[in-house]
Image (spheres, rainbow, N blue to C red):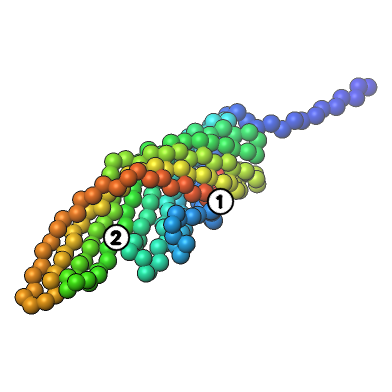
Amino acid sequence: MFLMAASVILVPSIHAFSLRLNVPVSGSYEVEDCSDCSPTSSGYSIRAILGMFGLGYAVGTFDYGYPSTSYNTDVKLAANAVDLSASFSFLTVGVGSVISGTYEGKYGYTETANDISKVVDTKFALDGSMTGTTSFINFNFGIGPIDLLVGYRMWNTKFKRKMIGTTVATHTLYPTISSTTSIDESLSETSLDFDQITAGIGFRF
């Protein structure tokens, strides 16, 4: 009589395919020179993983949250990136590049001095393209064919802005005279870094 023993070792399948979706749930945000701002962030990332390696697309948005008393209103940034990742058991890490983005918002005010009322009304836009990097780390907890995801993503963006609009100056004394000046002004290059804590779900096939 022979006694036979067998042991089974579970290892990740190098042929496994999965799809994952992550969204931000909180983060670390700061707006330079604006202590009264209440910034928020949103976005998403979607990833396809085959074996150890994955390809993803991510969108990160940042609302500067300027107060109502500010000359700036509705200022928002959106960055779009592609990234590559590697998965090791329950851990996935990745890096990528910002491929495009948008920057929008308004800057305006009204002031009166020396019998002249001045109204500035401009909009922000990108002057050129947005560049930068993104990186992330994800932890996945498998429940059957489903993965529950918790992660951390960092965004580093660089861009140049411009202001487009008008300045209307009106002499308030009789006779009333108004003049309009067009504004098309390029601003210096700037950067914005923000971090996101993410959560998500994945499906293995």
| Residue depicted at 33% across the width and 50% down the height | 103
Residue 98 at what x, y percent from top left?
Answer: 41, 39
Is residue 65 or residue 140 the one in the foreground? Answer: 65
Q: Give residue 132's quadrant in the image.
A: top left
| Residue depicted at 46% across the width and 43% down the height | 156
Residue that extends furthest to the bottom in the rendered view of this protein: 174
Q: Quadrant of the C terminus?
A: top right
* Image mark count: 2
Q: Quadrant of the N terminus?
A: top right
Residue topped by disc 1: 197
Residue 74 at what x, y percent from top left?
Answer: 35, 61
Q: Is residue 146 visible?
A: no
Q: Residues within 10 Å of mark 2 (few under 14, many from 20)?
A: some
Residue topped by disc 2: 107
Is residue 192 or residue 205 the one in the foreground? Answer: 192
Could you tell me the amino acid type at mark 1? Answer: Ile
Q: Is residue 31 above or below residue 156?
A: below
Q: Earlier in the sequence, mark 2 or mark 1?
A: 2
Residue 35 at what x, y percent from top left?
Answer: 47, 62
Q: Is residue 101 visible?
A: yes
Q: Is residue 95 left or right of residue 174?
A: right
| Nearer to us: label 2 or label 1 | 2
Residue that extends furthest to the top in the rendered view of this protein: 2
Q: Element under label 1?
A: strand
| Residue depicted at 17% across the width and 70% down the height | 116
| Residue depicted at 23% across the width and 49% down the height | 185
Could you tell me the amino acid type at mark 2? Answer: Tyr
